[in-house]
């Protein structure tokens, strides 16, 4: 009887070790909350309006018409974004002005694309 030759595969290329920064369970939970806050089309539109505002801040009352929602609904969405750390609120008398938190959005980008560098860092002035 003839012996059979058993071939083994070289797995050194297939089983490469994971590299990069590990995401702790606590940090993952915080980031997941931010992604949840972005999971609503109205909140995405609000955040886009804040990011593209010429002065970087927008009064809550000025968001009602562009998003087509009532003042209480807009306030609710802003509260969700604020609690997720994606926007800040600055009260001026009876008015509240909101602005996006670029560092927080950058952290979300880094989770999805770990090699990402802000445009200002990569190419100089944006």
Image (spheres, helix red, strand yellow):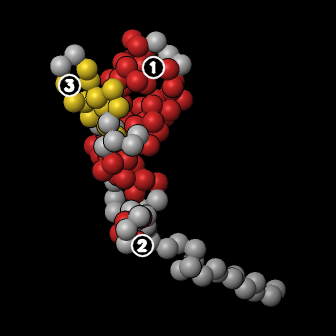
What is the residue that sits farthest to the left in this orientation?
93
Q: Residues within 10 Å of mark 1 (few under 14, many from 20)?
A: some
Task: Using the rendered view, name the quadrant where residue 47 is placed.
Answer: top left
Residue depicted at 46% across the width and 59% down the height: 113
Residue depicted at 56% across the width and 79% down the height: 13
Residue 62 in percent (x, y) is at: 40, 24
Residue at the spot of label 3: 91
Give the label on residue 52, or none.
none
Residue at the spot of label 2: 123
Q: Are marks 3 and 1 in contact (CB under 8 Å)?
A: no
Q: SS of the residue at dot 1?
A: helix
Q: Residues within 10 Å of mark 3 (few under 14, many from 20)?
A: few
Disc on the earlier residue, 3 or 1: 1
Q: Determine the CA span between mark 3 and mark 1.
A: 18 Å
Residue at the spot of label 1: 64
Looking at the image, can residue 95 be seen? yes
Q: What is the quadrant of the C terminus in the image? A: bottom left
Residue 9 in percent (x, y) is at: 64, 79
Disc on the earlier residue, 2 or 3: 3
Q: Is residue 39 above or below residue 93?
A: below
Q: Determine the CA span between mark 1 and mark 2.
A: 36 Å
Q: Is residue 59 above or below residue 8?
A: above
């Amino acid at each position: 009887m003839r012996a059979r030759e058993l071939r083994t595969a070289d797995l050194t290329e297939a089983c490469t070790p994971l590299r990069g920064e590990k995401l702790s369970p606590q940090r993952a939970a915080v980031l997941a909350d931010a992604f949840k806050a972005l999971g609503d089309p109205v909140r995405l539109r609000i955040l886009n309006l804040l990011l593209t505002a010429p002065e970087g801040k927008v009064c809550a009352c000025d968001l009602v018409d562009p998003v087509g929602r009532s003042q209480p609904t807009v306030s609710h969405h802003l509260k969700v974004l604020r609690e997720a750390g994606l926007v800040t609120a600055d009260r001026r008398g009876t008015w509240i002005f909101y602005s996006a938190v670029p560092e927080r959005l950058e952290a979300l980008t880094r989770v999805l694309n770990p090699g990402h560098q802000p445009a200002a860092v990569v190419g100089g002035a944006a």
